[in-house]
Image: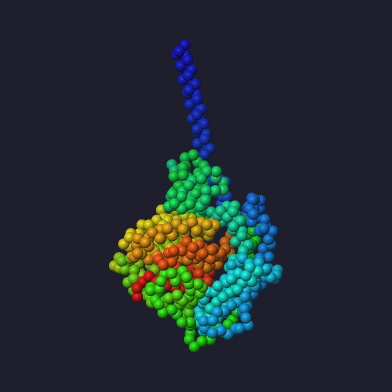
Amino acid sequence: MKTQTAFHFVVTLGLFTVCLLLLALHVRQSTSLSKPDVKEEVRRSSDWQGPMSVDGKTLSELKAVKGNPLASAIAQTDPKSCSYAPYSNIQLASSKTDFKLGDTISVKIQLFDEYKRRKTTGGDNVRIWMSEKSKEARAAGVVTDNKDGTYIGTLKALWAGSPKIEASIASRKENVDIFYRVYHDFYTLRNLSAMFESDGVKEETLCLPVPNIRGFTNVCNLTAENYGLPWYCGKPSHRKLLCHDFTGLREPDKQPSLFTSHEANFFKGNRLHQTISTAVQIKVSSDQEIVSLPSVPCNRTPLRKSWEASTPVGFFYKNSWKSLTCTNTIPDDSKIYKKCLKNRRFWIHGDSSSRSWFNVLTKRLGLKLVTEEWDHSKWHKPAVTMDKNWNISLMLVPHEYPFYHGYTFNKLAYNRATHAYLDDIPNNSNDIFVIHIYLHFNPFPPEVFKTHMQRIVRSVKSLVARAPGVKVAIRGTHAFKGRGKIGFLDDCWMYPYDAIQREAFKGLENNVLFLNNVDLTVATENDDQHPNPLAVDSLINHLMGSVCEG
C-alpha cells in the first residue's frame, strides 16, 4: 500500500513538473525576440510613442491637450494673429538721423499680425543689430519689451559711417507657449532612448531627467550612472533585462510629433525667425574711425568685469572684434598661443559647438590626434590632440546626459559629467577649462539646465579655492536661427539660460571668466545652430588674451 502511494505521488509530481516546464516554455516564447520590431533585433517598448515622422504625423487633439492649462488658450489662438515681421516696422524714436560717435541710438519697433493688425501684447523675442558692409562693421543692440506690441531697441554709435539698423522676431510667444504645453504633457520635445541588453536580449526604452515617463509604470533610476544628475529610463519589459543591463543611449532616428495639427501650423510658412522688412539708415560722424577702446589689457582686467559688462560688450570693425571691456594684447598667432599653452592642458568642454573650438585650435597649433581616429566629422566622444615638444594637450570632453549623439547607441563613458572632470584636476594644476552646456538641454524645460549648472558651480567653487593656478571660463549662450521645422525654434532659451548662468555663478565673478557669445552671434546674424567661424575665432582670441601673459 505504501509502495502504491509513493508511486502515485511520484507520477503526480512528474506531471506537475512537466506542466511547469511547458508553461515556462510558453512564457519564454511569448517574451522572446523571435520577430523584432526594429532593426538590429532590438525590442522596442510599444507604448512610448514609437518611431513617427516629426513632419508627417501629429498626436490626436484630445491626447495632446488633455488636462493641460495652456492647451485651451493655444487651441483658440489663430496662428495668423501672431506677430508677423513682413508687416511690422522699425523707426527711429526721434526725427534725428545724424549722430556723433559714442551716441546712444533708440528705435521703436511696432509688431503687426498677418491680418495687418497692430499687436497690443508683448512677449515675443525681438532682436536688433546694426551693420555696415563696406567697413565690415557689426554690433548688437538691446531690446526692451513694452508689453503692448511695441519694443524699444537701444544701440551705440561705435564707428563713423552710415550703418544700417535691423531687427527680427527671433521667436514668437505662442511658439514658446506650445513648447511649455508639450513640457507639461511629455517633459521633452525630442526623444532619447536607452539600450538594455543581456544574454542576447535587447530592448530600447524612453529616457528623461524625471521619473514620470509616459508608457512606463516602472522606471530605472540611472542618476548614479549620470554622476548624480537626474536621469531615468523606462524599465525593460523583458524578464531577462534589469536596470543594470543599461549599455548606452541614442537619439531615435524617427522622432514622434508631440504637437497637435493646430499647433503645427504655428511653425509653418514664414513664421519662425523673421527679419523685419524695414530698416533704419543713420549717419555717424567723427574725426576718428571708431570709439576709444579701453587701455587695460584683458589679462590684467578683473574677471568680474566680464560678468558686469552689458550689451554691447564689443563690436566688429574690419572683421576684427573690438572688446569694450579690455584691450587684447595677444595677437591671433600660433607661436604666441603655443608659448602660453606650453606645459598645460586645455579642456574644451561641451557639445558640437565646442568641437568647432577643438578643431580650430588643433589646426592652428598643429596638434596631433593621440586618441582614436575619427570615423566621421560629427564626433561626440572624448578626444585629445597634443604637441609633445611643447607639452600641450587639448582635451575635448562632451558633457553628461542629456546628450544627443545621433542614431547609434553610445556608451555612458563618453559623457562623463562636467563636475567629475573638474573634481579630478589636481591642486597644483595650471589647466585652462572652458565650460559650455546649451543646445542639448533645449528640448527640456529650463529647470533641467539650471540643475546641471548649479552642480557645475559647486565643483568650480571647490576648484578655484584649492587650485589657484587653474583658469576657468564659461562660454555663454549664442544666437542662431531655427531649422524651419515643426518643433524647432531658434535660440528662444538664449536669454533665459544666460540669466540662469549669471545667477548660478554669483559669488564667483572674481574667479571665473564669462565669455559673452550673445553679442558676437547677434551682431554677425549667426544662422546655424553652431556659431559661425568669425564668432568662433574672435571668442577664442578673446579667451587667449584673457588667460595668457603678454
Query: Looking at the image, is 92 positioned above or below residue 502?
Result: below
What residue is rendered at 49% in x and 39% in y? 239
Q: Quadrant of residue 82?
A: bottom right
Where is residue 318? Give x, y as percent: 47, 80
Please name the residue shown 35% across and 60% down the image.
Answer: 466
Left or right of residue 56, residue 320 in this image: left
How many numbered marks appear? 0
Q: Viewer-proximal residue, 142 or 486? A: 142
Residue 193 seen: no
* Residue at the image point whose x is 45% and y is 75% from the top: 325
> Residue 322, position in %: x, y?
45, 77
Task: Farthest residue to the top: give it.
Answer: 1
Residue 344 seen in render? yes
Report the side of 246 relative to 340 (left or right): right
In-front residue for pair 287/144: 144
Q: Residue furthest bottom?
A: 287
**Residue 384 at x, y percent in the picture:** 36, 62
* Quadrant of the snapshot with the C terminus: bottom left
Foreground pick, 45 / 217: 217
User: Can you give x and y, in whole percent of width and height, for residue 352 in the image?
Assistant: 46, 63
Residue beneath the point at 56% across and 50% down: 50
On screen, 83 above or below 240? below
Most foreground residue, 32 or 399: 399
